[in-house]
């Protein structure tokens, strides 16, 4: 078993890496990189040299190229003590394009020689002047930079290396004066404290937490009333930053941030002020000089841990997708398995023919068509909500889940009915069943101990994949019912050429697939003692 697990885990990891690499090749090597600007309004406004610089800067952000500006090169030389401030000022690339100082010529040539030797291409754009020759055109400032396409293997290695990040007290730059860098453990989370008028603590709430100073996150471990109740920020999963779908936010955060309208509650800010707020103080992260720059922060926060998310009254994208998906999966098994058994036991009878007709209908009719059909029936006959509305409460909020769950369960019910019927019919025609009958076993015993048990083994194998698959969402169902789930993420990313989201979701989906198959094997072995993954020596 250990050897089998080791092989499957190693094979699964290699498969995940291979799939991610293939997607990266398709995106960064075979797809026209100019497409990322199709919906970029800012790019369309750029003109002259500024447009070229902006284009390469965005390509660097999207991961196509490694780009170094001449100004960055000069800054680095100044920081390393290779040039003085006087030389730095004199060597700055001139707006007019007229180089009159020896320092500028030497540094420009040094920049070109250095990066050309490292395989970079140099782009030097002279100042774009008006016809009079005395004034620059808009966006026509002279510019100089070097760029190089990033090889796929290098991009893949960098991406995989940064998937997991570990927070520590050394996250904040050593030059920053933030006081003592440390971790603090408390049994009473300060955001739940209540204070008297004289500033003394009136009441505490038992809620263990670990807080950090010098870390990226203020809270490294904390408890609250939301699933999974115990939360940690020691280890962060980084699937890749979004540039269009949810600009500046990591794919993992995009999938897991709560949605809906703000949900306020009473909490205590670090300054001791207790007020009703939607700020989620547990998500506070460090932003340099933010306390000094924002007056609103100064009355509430005491340090630069000011960047917070807000509490919302809805679930996250993954939350909605998983809730609908898992309920649809449960409904599919509750209906599909009994109906499949019934069809097998009444082979060629009316119920079998009706079940077969349903299977043919689901397979033959496009999913979009029957989803709209059941939506029309549900809304007109049963008066169920047509679309999702995050602001709904009470009974309406529950009812709006019904149609998406049913629509998502329909094909799964058909699949389970079809395969269980087939497996049972195969088992009923097996020789061992005939021997069991001749041995005097009753039909009930044969059905329970042999036919159903053996027919269920392949069905059991698919259970983990069905459960994990609920996390990915359903593209068509979520679009039809306007469900704010994870199903639309990939299509939105493809439409906006958001490479970070595409790669991150590919890795996420591939991992779920591999884990689902592995758990399916283990569950199948647990259900049937005859299945063993141990290697037998001959």
Image (cartoon, rainbow, N blue to C red):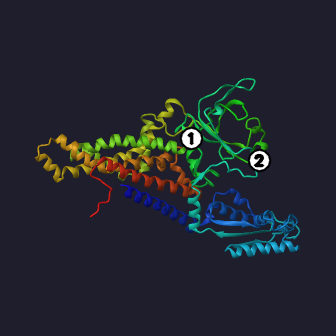
Q: Which mark is residue 162?
A: none
Instruction: Tell me residue 265's x, y (percent).
Output: 63, 31
From the viewer's side, name the closer residue of 518 and 337: 518
At 61% from the left and 28% from the top, the residue drawn is 205
Q: Please state if 80 lies on the left or on the right of 508 as rendered.
A: right
Residue 58 is at least partly visible in this image: yes
Of mark 2 and mark 1, the one earlier in the sequence is 2
Check disc 1: other Cα within 10 Å, few if <14, some if 14-19, many if 20+: some
At 61% from the left and 63% from the top, the residue drawn is 35
At 60% from the left and 51% from the top, the residue drawn is 166
From the viewer's side, name the closer residue of 31 and 186: 186
Q: Secondary structure at mark 2?
A: loop
Residue on which the image places disc 2: 177
From the viewer's side, name the closer residue of 246 and 18: 18
Instruction: Tell me the quadrant of the picture where the C terminus can be found.
Output: bottom left
Residue 212 is at least partly visible in this image: no
Q: Please state if 278 lies on the left or on the right of 430 as rendered.
A: right
Instruction: Tell me residue 464's x, y (percent).
Output: 40, 48
Q: Please state if 382 lies on the left or on the right of 252 as rendered.
A: left
Instruction: Tell me residue 52's x, y (percent).
Output: 72, 66
Instruction: Tell me residue 536's x, y (percent).
Output: 29, 60
Quadrant in the rendering for residue 335: top left
Residue on which the image places disc 1: 231
Q: Secondary structure at mark 1?
A: strand
Viewer-side label of 2, 1: 2
In the image, residue 175 sits, relative to residue 282, either above or below, namely: below
Whether label 2 touches label 1, CB < 8 Å = no
């Amino acid at each position: 078993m250990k050897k089998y697990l080791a092989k499957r885990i190693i094979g699964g990891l290699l498969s995940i890496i291979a799939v991610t690499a293939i997607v990266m090749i398709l995106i960064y090597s075979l797809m026209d990189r100019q497409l990322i600007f199709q919906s970029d309004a800012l790019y369309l406004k750029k003109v002259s040299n500024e447009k070229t610089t902006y284009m390469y800067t965005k390509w660097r952000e999207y991961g196509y190229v490694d780009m170094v500006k001449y100004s960055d090169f000069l800054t680095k030389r100044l920081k390393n003590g290779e040039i003085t401030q006087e030389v730095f000022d004199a060597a700055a690339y001139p707006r007019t394009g007229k180089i009159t100082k020896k320092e500028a010529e030497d540094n420009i040539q040094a920049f070109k020689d250095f990066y050309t030797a490292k395989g970079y291409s140099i782009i030097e754009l002279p100042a774009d002047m008006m016809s009079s020759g005395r004034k620059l055109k808009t966006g026509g400032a002279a510019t100089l930079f070097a760029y190089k396409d990033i090889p796929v293997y290098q991009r893949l290695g960098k991406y995989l290396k940064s998937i997991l990040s570990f927070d520590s007290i050394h996250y904040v730059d050593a030059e920053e004066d933030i006081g003592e860098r440390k971790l603090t453990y408390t049994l009473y989370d300060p955001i739940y404290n209540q204070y008297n008028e004289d500033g003394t603590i009136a009441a505490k709430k038992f809620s263990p937490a670990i807080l950090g100073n010098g870390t990226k996150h203020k809270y490294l471990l904390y408890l609250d009333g939301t699933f999974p109740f115990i939360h940690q920020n020691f280890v962060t999963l980084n699937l890749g930053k979004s540039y269009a779908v949810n600009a500046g936010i990591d794919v993992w955060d995009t999938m897991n941030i709560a949605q809906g309208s703000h949900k306020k509650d009473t909490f205590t800010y670090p300054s001791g002020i207790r007020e009703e707020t939607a700020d989620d103080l547990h998500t506070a992260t460090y932003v340099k000089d933010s306390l000094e720059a924002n007056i609103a922060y100064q009355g509430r926060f005491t340090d630069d841990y000011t960047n917070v998310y807000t509490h919302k009254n809805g679930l996250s994208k993954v939350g909605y997708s998983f809730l609908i998906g898992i309920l649809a999966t449960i409904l599919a098994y509750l209906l599909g398995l009994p109906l499949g058994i019934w069809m097998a036991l009444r082979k060629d009878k009316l119920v079998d023919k009706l079940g077969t007709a349903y299977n043919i209908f689901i397979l033959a009719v496009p999913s979009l068509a029957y989803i709209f059909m059941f939506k029309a029936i549900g809304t007109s006959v049963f008066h169920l909500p047509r679309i999702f509305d995050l602001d709904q409460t009470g009974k309406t909020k529950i009812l709006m889940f019904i149609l998406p769950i049913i629509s998502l369960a329909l094909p799964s019910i058909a699949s389970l009915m079809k395969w269980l019927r087939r497996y049972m019919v195969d088992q009923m025609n097996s020789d061992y069943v005939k021997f069991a009958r001749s041995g005097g076993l009753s039909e009930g015993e044969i059905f329970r101990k042999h036919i159903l048990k053996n027919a269920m083994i392949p069905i059991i194998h698919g259970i983990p994949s069905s459960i994990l698959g609920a996390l990915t969402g359903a593209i068509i169902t979520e679009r039809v019912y306007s469900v704010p789930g994870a199903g639309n993420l990939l299509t939105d990313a493809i439409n906006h050429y958001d490479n970070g989201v595409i790669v991150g979701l590919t890795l996420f989906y591939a991992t779920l697939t591999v884990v689902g198959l592995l758990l399916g094997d283990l569950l199948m072995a647990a259900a049937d003692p005859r299945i063993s993954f141990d290697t037998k020596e001959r």
